[in-house]
Image (tube, rainbow, N blue to C red):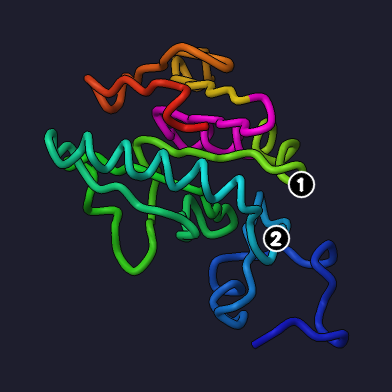
Amino acid sequence: MAATLDQPTPSAKHWTWEDLLRFEETERYEVYDGRLISMPRSNTFRHQEVLGNLMLLVASFLQKKPLGELVLGPMDVVFSDDNIAEPDLLFIANEHVSIIKDHIFGAPDLIVEVLMPSSIRRDRYEKLEQYARFGVKEYWIIDPANQSVEILELRDGRYAVHATAVGTGSVSSSVLAGLELEIAQLF
C-alpha cells in the first residue's frame, strides 16, 4: 500500500521492516534507526556503468574461486527490524549463506556503494555507521566523479582503510582474498 496524505509522515513514525512490506513494490525505501529514507527512483547511467563493470569483474573472480554469493542491488538487507538498507552490491561468504531468504536477514560480509550526488552524505556517514554497527566486515565506497575506490575493513567495531586508489592503481580485498581490481577497469 502506498503512503497517502492521511498516513503518518516519515518523521512522525518509527518505521520497521513490517511497515516496508506494506509499500508498493515500485517504491524504494531504507530505514535507519526507525527513520524512513526515500531512495531515488532510478540511478544515473554512470552509476550503473561503474556498478556493472564491478559486478562483471567480481563475478569473474568468483567463478574461478567460489567463495560465496554475489548479489546485485537493489536488495533489502534487514539488519534489524528498524534498520534496513539497499546496497548497490553485496557479497555473502559460503559460511554465512543462511542469511539469504527472499531478502537478506543479517550482515553480508562485504557491501559496495557507488556514490551519486544525492547519496554522498548517506553513504559516507549513515551507512558507514550502520554497516559497522551490524558487523559488515568490508565496506567499499566507489566514487565515479573522482574515479576513486576506498575499501574499509571492520576492526574493533570501526572501519579502517584497507586499500584506496584514485584515478590509477589497484585495490585488493581482504574478504575476497586474491581479488585485485585495477581502477581503470571500473571507470
Figure quadrant of the N terminus: bottom right
Number of numbered discs = 2
Secondary structure under tag 1 reads loop
Q: Residue at x 27, y 23 (%)?
A: 179
| Mark number displayed over residue 118 | 1
Above/below status of 17 relative to 167: below
Give me the disc on residue 55: none
Task: Give the answer, above or below, for where 66 lies relative to 82.
Answer: above
Q: On the picture, is 172 further left or further right than 118?
A: left
Amino acid tagged 2: Pro
Decide: few, some or many residues near mark 2? Use Cα within 10 Å; few <14, some 14-19, many ≥20.
few
Q: Measuring 59% from the left and 72% from the top, which residue is drawn there? A: 20
| x and y, in percent, of residue 31 in the image | 64, 57
Seen from the viewer's position, the closer of residues 178 and 154 is: 178
Residue 129 lies in the magenta stretch? yes
**Contact? badges 2 and 1 (CB < 8 Å):** yes
At a point 75% along the width and 81% down the height, the residue shown is 3
- Give the camera-side residue of 16 and 159: 159
Q: Which residues are magenta?
A: 127-146
Is label 2 in a helix, a strand or a loop? loop
- State the CA–CA distance, disc 2 to disc 1: 8 Å
- Tell whether position 142 is magenta: yes
- Residue 17 in the image: state x and y as whole percent: 54, 66
Q: Where is residue 150 shown, x and y percent of the image?
A: 53, 21
Q: Where residue 167 sits: x, y (%)?
A: 57, 17
Q: Amino acid at mark 1?
A: Ser
Q: Kindly identify which residue carries mark 2.
A: 40
**Residue sitting nearer the eye, 14 or 96:** 96
For image coordinates 38% across by 57% down, the residue present is 104
